[in-house]
Amino acid sequence: MIRKMLAAVVAAGTVGVLALSGCSGGGGDVNAQAQQFTKDTKAQISFSWWGNNDRADQFGKAIALFNKEYPNVKVTRSFAAFADYWTARSTEAAGHALPDLMMMDAGYLSEYAGKNLLQDLTPLRSSVMPLDGVDDSSLGAGKVDGKLESVPLGTNTWSMMYNKDLLDKLGIKYPTDNMSWTDLGNFVREVDKAGASANPSQFGSSDYTDGLPGFIYWLMQQGKDVFTKEGKPAFTQQQVIDYVDSVKDMRTGGSFFPIKRDVALDPLNGFLAGQAALWFNFSTTLLQAMTDSKTEHIGIVPAPSPDGVDKHVLAQHPSLLLSVSANSKQKAAAAALLNFLVTSPDVAAVFGTSLGVPATEEGRAAAAKANATPADAAILKYASDMAPETTASYPLLPAGYGTVEAKWGELHQQLEYGQLSSKQFAQQFFDEMSLSLGN
């Protein structure tokens, strides 16, 4: 389940951000820098990201490509695990010493932008950072109060994955891309019935109201706002109740993968252990699905729509973003590197879909040609198939979002164990938002 993967990361990663102090870096006149910057300009910039050694090797190749075009820009690189990365950024922010270019997470964007720690990149669009080929809906995910504070390095989309091997063994037809929530309930019950005699018994799905991203898309499918510009919830407690109660009969009737078994499988879940047919998550987790479930036979379709809604609303979620710090003294050079990483087809060929679906059509084509893995091919095809229905920007997540997302998962587990009613779930979730979002 999503809650298992996120809770530990969020709990560790949000502590440092709380210490941020409001400041602007005073890194110089960005317009003057942009006018003076050329491909021969000498500059030294720092670039930091989170990830492992494989990602570091890939960024090393990408920066070597950048230096073929900008030979006099020296890039000092550093990386760390996710939690350590944000602890370091918090310390640097307090001392006005953030990296010139830094990887940004959607859950932290409002926090950093609200403290004036990031450079508005809009003035650089006409010069060193045109972002050719990046569509406006993707850029919308990096805007705060109309300012372009961050740019998606890659995107992903909410999806429903299914285990073809499991369904083939049970003789069940695969889920389709035009299912309603009622259709999904019938599908889950069909798999449950067919898998009851297996050892261990197999199920259609875990409770798919267990993650906050699923609720966000449920609201968007109905044309509802999620958060206000002030970072407050635009939804009500009753909408939360309606969402989790939409599968109440299935939850109490034993139609979902048992929560006790799910907890016992941690850090896997029923789907990743090959015991449940469906998994709801962002599309770029398909590689994890194939790796952990030990099969490449994983299909991917959009999550169902509410009954009576005949079109999906599949806003692109920024998998990773890049920001230039307000304290940078080399904003033009940092923006040039940002532009190169986001738009270069050669960079897309290096990373494939490991940073999300490339932001440009040329990048996606390059990733598809560069010895794409089965996961890369499926992720790129899904992005292409869903492009006509990708119309809205993903909602800007308020400062403190990571904490409330983790709280949703914690409370939902109690709901599944029968320790909370849906009304208590909604009340305690709003209590957490009041604390974490300052509402």
Image (spheres, rainbow, N blue to C red):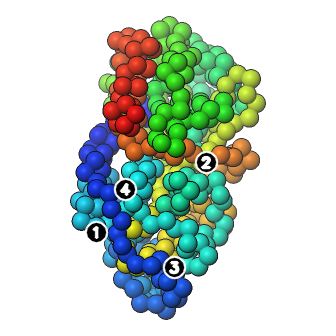
Q: What residue sits right under mark 2 in the picture?
A: 393
The residue at 49%/13% (across/down) is 251
Near mark 4 (Cα within 10 A), the count class, few <14, some 14-19 or many ≥20, is some
Q: Is residue 41 visible?
A: yes
Image quarter of residue 171: top right
Q: Amino acid at mark 4?
A: Lys
Q: What residue sits right under mark 1 in the picture?
A: 97
Out of 373 and 242, give the one closest to the viewer. Answer: 242
Q: Amino acid at mark 1?
A: Ala
Secondary structure under tag 4 reads: loop
**What label sits on residue 31 in the rendered view?**
3
Q: Amino acid at mark 3?
A: Asn
Near mark 3 (Cα within 10 A), the count class, few <14, some 14-19 or many ≥20, is few
> Do callouts 4 and 2 mark residues in contact (Cβ within 8 Å)?
no
Secondary structure under tag 1 reads: loop
Q: Earlier in the sequence, mark 1 or mark 4?
A: 1
Give the side of residue 165 with respect to residue 101, left or right: right
Q: What residue sits right under mark 4 in the picture?
A: 115
Which marked residue is nearer to the observer: mark 3 or mark 2?
3
Q: Quadrant of the C terminus?
A: top left
